[in-house]
Image (spheres, grey):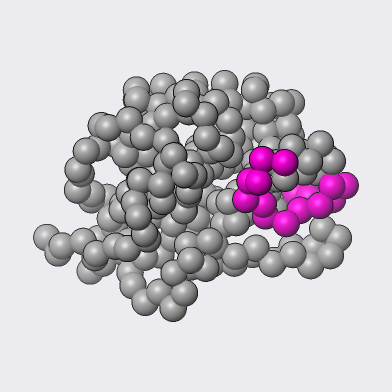
Amino acid sequence: MYYTKKNADAIIYPASLTKIMTAIVAIEMTDNLQTQTIVEPQTIANYTAQNASMAGFQAGDFVTMEDLLYGTLLASGADATGTLADAVAGSEDKFVTLMNNKAQELGMHDTHFVNTSGLHDEAHVSSVRDISKLLQYALENPIFYQIFTSKSYTTYVPNQLIITNSLFTKLPGLDSPIIGGKTGYTPEAGLCLASIIEKEGKSFLFITTNAPSYIWNPPPTY
């Protein structure tokens, strides 16, 4: 992997880039991605009240862990992250402890998570360098890589739900070496993007935060 850095150690709000950690922790803690769980009404109500982005699951839906992972990484759904946290750890607070433990394991010393979704909190912080470490680690997991680089996913819970990758939705007609990515936004964090680019046989991580728009320049050829 290759990446260039600018202000890599500045403390930033990671917004929905948080969900990269949510997903990789859930993957590592789950033996069978076809295990089912239920979407609780209070989960939907909680995140709807906060105007969080949602994947489209409904209260009472029986979903697989795989469904929730696609909902987390592609649609950036807080309904998915909240349900994952409950299914894996019993509560969001307990799951966040797992996220912070993994951050320390990876040497993400500028990072502290407060929630699974990336909703704004003054104590929910990271840095571009830390997000780079996280994404590089996560992409080594074949399940994460497959989901992260998918453009869409279809499930039935019980009705058909098509989940599309928000990166390709926000950049329609994208013709580039970008093969996958995770977007994020809060007013405090600005526009955030963590993506993987393949160019001339090399892989590049492209991570930006607090940006005014989703604009990127292809990396130089080395």
What is the quadrant of the C terminus in the image? Answer: bottom left
Q: Residue at x 47, y 62 (%)?
A: 167
Q: In front: 217, or 144?
A: 217
109 vs 26, left or right, is left
Where residue 5 sits: x, y (%)? 20, 44
Where residue 10 sits: x, y (%)? 27, 32
Q: In front: 89, or 124?
A: 124
**Image position of 156 with respect to 173: above or below:** above
Where residue 116 sits: x, y (%)? 59, 35
Q: Residue at x 35, y 55 (%)?
A: 212
Q: Residue at x 48, y 48 (%)?
A: 185
Looking at this rendering, what residue extends furthest in the front direction? 187
Is residue 38 in sight in this rendering?
Answer: no
Looking at this rendering, what residue extends furthest in the left direction? 222
Q: Quadrant of residue 93?
A: top right
Q: Residue at x 24, y 37 (%)?
A: 8
Q: Is residue 164 magenta?
A: no
The magenta stretch is 49-64
Q: Is residue 61 magenta?
A: yes
Dominant secondary-structure state across the stretch colored magenta: loop
95 vs 99, left or right, is right
Q: Quadrant of residue 39?
A: top right
Looking at the rendered structure, the number of numbered marks drawn on it comes to: 0
Is residue 29 in sight in this rendering?
Answer: yes
Q: In front: 199, or 128?
A: 128
Where residue 100 sits: x, y (%)? 49, 23
37 vs 93, left or right, is right
